[in-house]
Structure formats: structure tokens, C-alpha cells
Amino acid sequence: MAGMSAPLTIMLVVGEPSGDVLGAELMRELKAHAARAGLPAIKLVGVGGDAMTREGLQSLFSLDATSVMGLREVVPRIPEILRRVRQAADFAVKTRPDVIVLIDSPDFTHRVARAIKRADPKLLTLNYAPPQVWASRAGRAKRMATYMDAVLTLLPFEAPHFERHGLAAHFVGYPVIERAKHMVGGDEFRVRHNIAPNATLLAVLPGSRRNEIRFILPVFREAVGILARDMPDLVCVMPTIGHVAPLVQAAAKDWPTKIHVVEGDAEKFAAFDAADVALAASGTVTTELALARTPMVVAYRVGWLTFAIARHFVDVAYITLVNLILGRAAVPEFVQERCTPENLVQALTPLLRDEGARAAQVADLAEAMALIGEGQGSPIARAAQVIMDMATKAAISRVSDYLTRRASTRSDGFHCHCL
């Protein structure tokens, strides 16, 4: 049994690209935290994507099988997803990390957590970026208390929803706000891509999943085509990521305006800084755009069957975090049947043509970001602190149990021969 001088082992499990980015940021902070505390270098293992791999993770498998959404897309992948669940859980049980951090993607990561707890209830499981039980399927919080030991919540009003079921909850803040410092380089981006300073630049963001590209990108393309009729100087930039890049590149070949497809976080954030307006699928990217103070229109579409089922479980007025935080439709958003080229064009036009409309939304974006903690410290650092505390306590407990068992064994083997 290794002593406390041995490195702590932390297992991270994500299921899709947004979780991968968050996992990579967490990995950097965990390593920095250990260094500042003078601890041995921590060992980080588990499941991640490209971003976590760049931070040194040797992922058990790629995210191709697990990064899917919607019934039509998920059903054919179920055998592969379940195999990956078993693979991750078996690894945890075999290697016994000090704490297992399940990040976002509850349809996948929570299955992993349940499998781990069934096999070994003593292993510590922690959910970072837990499901929004306040928005849909509130009963999940009660169920989570049976297979999670703690949750790290992103929004201040989330913790009570878990605590009332006896699940330890720590509000750490919305980690995306830490990306605000990266929203720079817009002028250089325009120069690098030969985009005139006075050209109208629209950032087009159709999502990071294959089915999002399938359902949303054609609508976005048609909307851009309508805009281009009256805006001959319109230029588009479309940031993308590796596993969907081929689909995006193919769609860009007959795009109705000049378009620049870029990859990588640095290019994406510079594009946000350079863009006048954005047309975006709902998701983390809308918060990144808010941090860049880029006015936006948000839309989302899924398969009709997925939507028909989901609408019975979701109980929120808005799909965009800015609107949820402010309690009003500061950002125009269009879901499912309302996600039409005509509606998108009608909402985009004033933002593209009217400086006052842009300024009004920018003020709303700033207000929302302040409310979730922009400029108020590091959510990732707070999350890392909780994780390190849990891992350290687990390691100490295991050392204590080992020493107790060892002392008991020695005592059982000692025989006193009295005269």
C-alpha cells in the first residue's frame, strides 16, 4: 500500500466535446493546485477528447461513440455506448482512483457512475456540471443521491435542489467565464484571413455534434443566403472542431457568401472577437459569445420524435443561459418549428444593420455575465479545491484503514505465554 507520498489519482470522465473542454481546463488547474501545495504530481486518468489529450490524458477510448444526441442518433449506438460504460466502470473498479469526476453528459457519465457504485460503493463519485434538475426531470436529484457522493454546481440556485435529497452540493461558479480573457485578437484575425475592417462579419455556429450539423446547418445556410441578397459585403466565419470538421467543410463548399472555416480554440475566440454578430446553435458557445460581447441570435432543432418526447420533460422559458439568468428574452431564440430561415433573418437584420440594437444586446450580455460571476474569481480553481480535498481525504482514509488492518493482523498473530 502506497503512503501519502504517492501521487493522488483522479479519474475524469466526459462524454462530448463541451465536457472535454471543461475537463481540460480542470486538468490544468488540478496540476497547478498540486504544484502550489507542494504535493507529488497527481495522476489523471479516464475518458476525454482532443483537449484533454493535449493536457496529457491517455483516454480509454475516443468520444465518437458517446457524443451523440437524439433518439434516432442514439439508438443505433446503444450497444457501443453500453460497452464504453462498462469499460470505464471496470477501469475505475480495477484501479481504484481516489476520486472519480463525472463531467456533464449525464446520459453517459451517470451510467458510468451507477455502474461504479454497483461494483464498489466505497469509490467516491463527484458530478461536475450536473444536470439542470431545476429545468427538467427534477426527480433525477433524488436518484443521483444513490450513486453520487457530491456535486459541483455552476449556478448559485442549483445547490438546494440536490441538498434537499441529502446530496452534498458545492457551488463553484460557471467555468466558462474564465474564457473571457481569451476573447481577443479580432483585428489580427481579420488581417490573417484577409477580411476587410469594414466588412460585415457573421459568425455561424451550427453545433458540435453530427446531428446538430444535420438539422441546424441547412437552416443557417438558407438564412445566410437570404441575408446575402441585400448585404453583398457579408462574410461568414464558421469555427468547428475535429470530429465534425469534415461535415462543416463539405457544407462550406457551396456557401452563399465568402466563408472562412477555422479550427482550434484560439481561432474560435479570435473569430468571436472579430465578428459583428453571431448565429449560433444553443449550447456553451452562446455563453462564450456573451463573454466576447458578440450579439447573437440562437436557434436549435432536433428530430421530431426527440422533440416530442423532450417537450414533456423540459420546464424552462428559455434555452439560452443569458435569457435564463436575466429572466427575459435579451437574445432572440428560435426552437424547433420556429427555427426557420425567415425567422432567423428577421432577428439578425437589426443586429447587423443597427448599432443601437447591437449595443442594447451587448449591455444585456454584460449584465448576465456579471450575475454568474465574471470578474469574481476562478470557478475552475474552486472546483479543483473541492476535488483535491475529496481525493486527499479518500487517500488518508485508505491509508488509515490499511494501517488499522495491518495492526489487527499483527495483534491476531501475537501469542502471550504466561508462567
Image: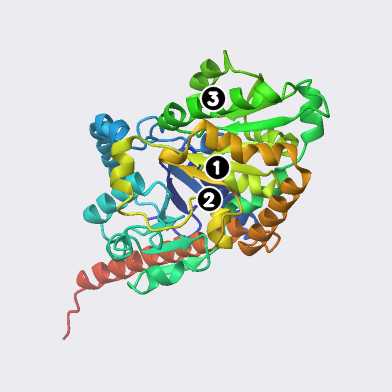
Q: Position of residue 189 (x, y in %)?
A: 76, 29
Q: Position of residue 245 (x, y in %)?
A: 53, 23
Between discs 3 and 1, the one toward the N terminus: 3
Q: Secondary structure at mark 3?
A: helix
Depth check, front residue: 327 or 293: 327
Q: Secondary structure at mark 1?
A: strand
Which residue sits at x=46%, y=28%?
213
Residue 294 vertical placement versus 268 (above, below): below
Q: In the image, which disc is placed on residue 355?
A: none
Q: Are marks 2 and 3 in contact (CB under 8 Å)?
A: no
Q: Are marks 1 and 2 in contact (CB under 8 Å)?
A: yes
Judging by the rendered image, the residue that carries numbered circle 3 is 222
Between discs 1 and 2, the one toward the N terminus: 1
Label 2 or label 3, whichever lies nearer to me, is 3
Residue type, mark 1 in image? Val
Farthest bottom residue in view: 419
Between discs 2 and 3, the one toward the N terminus: 3
Judging by the rendered image, the residue that carries numbered circle 2 is 320
Q: How many marks?
A: 3
Q: Is residue 39 visible?
A: no
Q: Is residue 348 visible?
A: yes
- The quarter in which the C terminus is drawn is bottom left
Q: Residues within 10 Å of mark 3 (few under 14, many from 20)?
A: some
- Calculate the distance from the C-alpha at mark 1 to the C-alpha at mark 2: 7 Å
